[in-house]
Image (cartoon, rainbow, N blue to C red):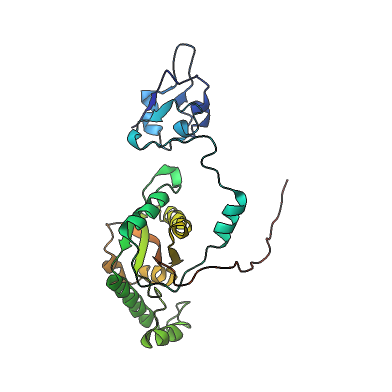
Amino acid sequence: MPNIIVNQELCTKCHQCSLTCPMGIIRPSRETKYPSIDKANEDSCMRCGHCEAFCPQQALVLDFLPEEKQSFAPGANTVNPDNLSLYMRSRRSIRFFKPEPVSRETIMQILEIARYAPTGGNSQKVEWLVIYDPAEVKRIATLTMDWMRSILGSSHPLAAYVPHIIKGWDMGFDPICRNAPHLVFAHLPVSDFIDDRTDAIIALSHFDLAAPAFGVGACWAGFIRMALDSYPPLQEALALPAEHKVGYGLFFGYPLHQVTAIPRRNKLQIEWRG
């Protein structure tokens, strides 16, 4: 497991690294010693990087992909609250797309941002599947429609809405992926004891929020998500690694229309305690 590498010329022995370590395993510096992790505690390190992220002198690095460390000047990571508010409130679910594809390079840039989404215990087990070929996206949509036909007349909560959805599909309208050129799924391993897909959904939320900065729009693929729970042909089409499940998916591409206003939302319902 990783340990910390301390630059003794920069370290002021301020104890910030040991104070911010979530696991409390960094031995505080002493007059004659620099901060360290005892060998017996190395397995407890979850590689979160708080030690290096909060070091005011940038005097240490976690020995985990140290070549990827990025430092920045104080304040360089701040965002004007008004700009942030406008950016996040103007985010829309996009359902009409231009036909041209998003470059793989742009998708990789968005995924690089989503890679830094928080995960429980910093497990970092989220993996990605990008359906890049529009023809394959159409196939996934077709399989989802096949699932909808299979629940006609059943007790499924969506069954009452299915006839209307099928009618639209048969008339040439795509209610599943809205003719988006691409799909992205976040998936992760599950077990008999843990079937929590929260980390994947958090990662996709990062993708969803980062995408507009690159001129890309997305929408949550709810119908596909429902179909994946119980329709083997669709599960087989995604061909995920064994014991992996999709947390959720997004269809995405370049928006056909541009956002120019922000709709209203219900007033906040807040209960303050203390």
Establish if 193 lies above or below 176.
above
- Name, please, the residue furthest toward the top: 32
Residue at image point 29% right, 74% down: 139
Please tell me which residue lies in front, 265 or 118: 265
Residue at image point 42% right, 47% down: 116
Q: Residue 157, percent across and down?
A: 48, 77
Residue at image point 67% right, 61% down: 268
Q: Quadrant of residue 66?
A: top left
In the picture, which quadrant includes the C terminus? top right
Establish if 169 lies above or below 251.
below
Q: How many marks?
A: 0
Q: Residue 100, percent across and down?
A: 34, 69
Does the image show residue 247? yes
In the picture, which quadrant includes the N terminus? top left
Please tell me which residue lies in front, 106 or 64: 106
Establish if 181 lies above or below 188.
below
Does the image show residue 191? no
Q: Residue 135, percent across and down?
A: 28, 73
Horizontally, is 182 left or right of 26 in the view?
left
Q: Residue 60, percent across and down?
A: 42, 27
- Name, please, the residue furthest toward the right: 274
Please tell me which residue lies in front, 184 or 260: 260
